[in-house]
Image (cartoon, rainbow, N blue to C red):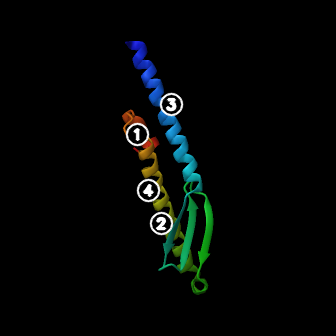
């Protein structure tokens, strides 16, 4: 009986590892866009938090301090969206699999 439990646990761990790997691959191609200033500044990040694009409305170029604030806000918006989507995908990848409490944050659970 003990051997059966170990084999079952190993199979479950392998399924979870495969699901997490697939979710990570999907995140690499995911793009999320954060905006600020009513769309005057937009920042697009990958699901891995890599910057892909920054767009700035020419009207925003007249005030450097405002532009700095808008860029920071757009980045934060994009990071929040990427984190939310990453959490959703990792939770889906580990759904139904028991994860020890100390490791839950690692998988978005």
Observer-nearest of 25 and 78: 25
Instruction: Kindly check if marks 1 and 2 are in contact, taking CB atoms under 8 A apart as contact.
Output: no
Residue 107 vertical position relative to residue 32 in the rendered view, above or below: above
Locate residue 60, reporting x and y percent.
57, 83
Nearest to the eye among marks 1 and 3: give it. 3
Residue 93 vertical position relative to residue 43 in the rendered view, above or below: above
Q: Residues within 10 Å of mark 3 (few under 14, many from 20)?
A: few
Observer-nearest of 79 and 97: 97
Residue assigned mark 3: 14
Residue assigned mark 1: 104
Measured in 3D between alpha carbons, the distance from the residue under mark 4 to the one under mark 3, in whole angstroms, is 25 Å
Name the secondary structure under disc 4.
Answer: helix
Nearest to the eye among marks 4 and 2: give it. 4
Measured in 3D between alpha carbons, the distance from the residue under mark 2 to the one under mark 3, in whole angstroms, is 34 Å
Observer-nearest of 76 and 2: 2
Instruction: Kindly check if marks 4 and 3 are in contact, taking CB atoms under 8 A apart as contact.
Output: no
Locate residue 35, reporting x and y percent.
50, 72
Q: Quadrant of the N terminus?
A: top left
Residue assigned mark 2: 77
Does any portion of residue 108 appear in the rendered image?
no
């Amino acid at each position: 009986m003990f051997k059966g439990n170990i084999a079952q646990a190993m199979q479950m761990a392998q399924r979870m590892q495969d699901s997490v790997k697939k979710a990570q691959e999907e995140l690499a191609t995911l793009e999320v866009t954060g905006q600020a200033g009513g769309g005057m500044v937009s920042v697009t990040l990958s699901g891995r938090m890599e910057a892909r694009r920054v767009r700035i409305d020419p009207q925003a170029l007249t005030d450097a301090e405002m532009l700095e604030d808008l860029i920071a806000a757009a980045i934060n918006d994009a990071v929040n969206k990427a984190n939310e989507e990453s959490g959703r995908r990792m939770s889906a990848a580990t759904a139904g699999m028991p994860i020890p409490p100390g490791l839950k944050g690692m998988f978005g659970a």
